[in-house]
Image: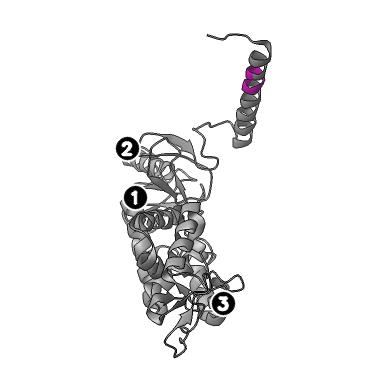
Amino acid sequence: PKTPIFPPSDRPPPAAMDSDDEPWGASDDDPVAVGDYYYDCSDGGSGGAGGGGEDEGSDCAGDDYEVREEVASMREKRYAVLSENDIHERQEEAIRRVSSIFSIPRESACILLRQYKWNISKLSDEWFADEERVRHFVGLPTNGAVLPDCQELTCGICFEGYSTSALSSAGCGHLYCHECWEGYISASINDGPGCLSLRCPEPSCTAMVLEETINRLAKDEEKVKYKQFLSCSYVEDNKKIKWCPAPDCTRAVEFLGDENYDVSCMCKFSFCWNCTEETHRPVSCETVSKWILKNSAESENVNWFVITHNFFVP
């Protein structure tokens, strides 16, 4: 009997997904979409329009062979290569979406997404279940602190007196002069991507420093670094996206399947999605890892022998 072909209006509904995961690819026995139809790769069924197909006695040849080739190609390329611009656009779209749905400022949406590893589904579920708990966990004050009605206030770091216009806080009410803020922000950004989780200088306070404060008080070169760290976080915090390991390549690869595959970047470098080493099928990732470790150890032993015996190796 022929393998059933489902026209667009009669396709079975997709299986339910875990809210914590992104959509993932089908298994080898699942129907695969080709154009407007599904094709069952587990059988020798034929492709066609609306299930009409060919005569009962025909085998998988001609047009069916081309369909099978297309299916095979699709299975081999269940991934997308992302340029720096693609990554930036996706990130900004996620921030705009959360800002709009939650009715919060862009900077707050950015902090939330960072803490939830850019998983909008999980963030939405927890936000609408208990907004106050999420705010406390992330470090977003519900309302901005009200400054006392004084002509002069004291900086919490240098303990000098300043007018209220020369002081800032992370929305928690702990005030620091702009000079101390600049030093605090500069040290954090130059230490690395941990600056994306920068909190109020007060040790007991968990209030997060928003991007608006960074843009207002950081130096120009530090703002650039901060934005680079933020852009990288979209890839490095996402379990479905990885950087291409080729030297000097700035692209990333988003994998749309649920198994380990070899992927190829637009720079022509091919690598194993699971271990990010060069393609090594049919050898397992574990075997490759042991082989690399063994070669590294042997190389170190050779170096040690040469050094200790004063041998010259041309």
* Left or right side of 243 for 280: right
- Residues tagged 2 and 1 counted as in contact (Cβ below 8 A): no
Find residue 11 and report its image quarter: bottom left
Checking the image for residue 136, the label placed there is 3
Question: What residue is rendered at 47% in x and 36% in y?
Answer: 271
Three-letter amino acid code of the residue under disc 1: Glu
Neighbour tally class for label 1: few under 14, some 14-19, many 20 plus, Cα within 10 Å: few
Q: How is the image coloured?
A: one colour
What residue lies at 44% left-to-right and 70% top-to-bottom?
210
Q: Is residue 41 magenta?
A: no
Amino acid type of the residue that numbered disc 2 sits on in the rendered structure: Gly
Q: Is residue 300 rendered to the left or right of residue 168? A: right
Q: Which numbered mark, 3 or 2, is in the foreground of this view?
A: 3
Residue 282 rendering spot, x and y as whole percentages: 56, 31
Judging by the rendered image, the residue that carries numbered circle 2 is 62
Residue denoted by label 1: 84
Q: Main secondary structure of the magenta part?
A: helix
Residue 15 in sight from this viewpoint = no
- Please report the bounds of the magenta region as a residue range: 299-303
Q: Secondary structure at mark 3?
A: helix
Residue beneath the point at 46% across and 47% down? 242
Q: Nearer the viewer, mark 1 or mark 3?
A: 3
